[in-house]
Structures are given as structure tokens and as C-alpha cells.
Image: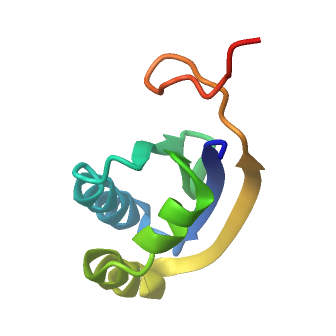
Amino acid sequence: MSKFGLFSRFIAKDGERDKLVHILIEASESLEKLKDCELYIVNTSDNEPNSVYVYEVWSNEDAHQASLTLETTQTLIKRAKPIITGIERISTLNPAGGKGIASSIKDI
């Protein structure tokens, strides 16, 4: 089974981006003990004052889906929903490897 990656954009209400960043950082911290979550990076852009980008890499898509059912995740989602005006899944990816994640490439 290949790795599963997501690149998403969350749009916060005016003036609420920093609060959303804080919640998403909490989410990343709650995933520290989940070995199936290999990478969860929260990003902002100087050009988009209401946007927060998240790049995440999982061992597989099922692990990602399972993480969404965790009580901690559900609590953080409930906190974030009132300040989010939109979510865009920019891309679903198949991470091959690189600095920070184990390679998923099989020997050729």
C-alpha cells in the first residue's frame, strides 16, 4: 500500500487566521504518537492573510481516515469549524520520499 498525502487550504474568517493556526498546530501535536502520521506541516502565506495550508503524509489513506474519528481530532474540528469559511483540498498526493519521510519506492 502506498503512502497517502494531502495538501489542503483552510480559509479563516477575517482576523481569525492565527487562532486557526494554533488549533492546527494542536492537531499536529496530538498526532505525534501516531506512527502512521509521518508529516503534518502547518503553513501560512504573507500574500493570503486568511489562508492556512496543511501538508500531511500518512502511511496509507485508511490511517488518515481513522485519525478523523479520534476524540481529540473531533474536539479540535469542533473548535475550528466556527472560524473556517472554506476548505479546499488542493491535491491528494502519493508521496515517494524525501527529507522527513521514509521512502515508499520499492527497489527497481
In the image, 53 versus 97, the foreground residue is 97
Q: Is residue 97 above or below residue 26?
A: above
In this rendering, would 93 be left or right of 35?
Answer: right
Name the residue at 61% across, 28% down: 104
Residue 105 locus on image (x, y percent): 67, 22
Name the residue at 37% across, 87% down: 78
Name the residue at 24% across, 60% down: 30
Q: Quadrant of residue 41?
A: top left
- Count the marks: 0
Q: Is residue 106 above or below residue 48?
A: above
Q: Quadrant of residue 98?
A: top right
Name the residue at 63% across, 48% down: 4
Q: Is residue 59 above or below residue 99?
A: below
Q: Quadrant of residue 72?
A: bottom left
Residue 88 locus on image (x, y percent): 71, 65
Residue 6 locus on image (x, y percent): 63, 51
Residue 82 locus on image (x, y percent): 44, 88
Q: Residue furthest top?
A: 108
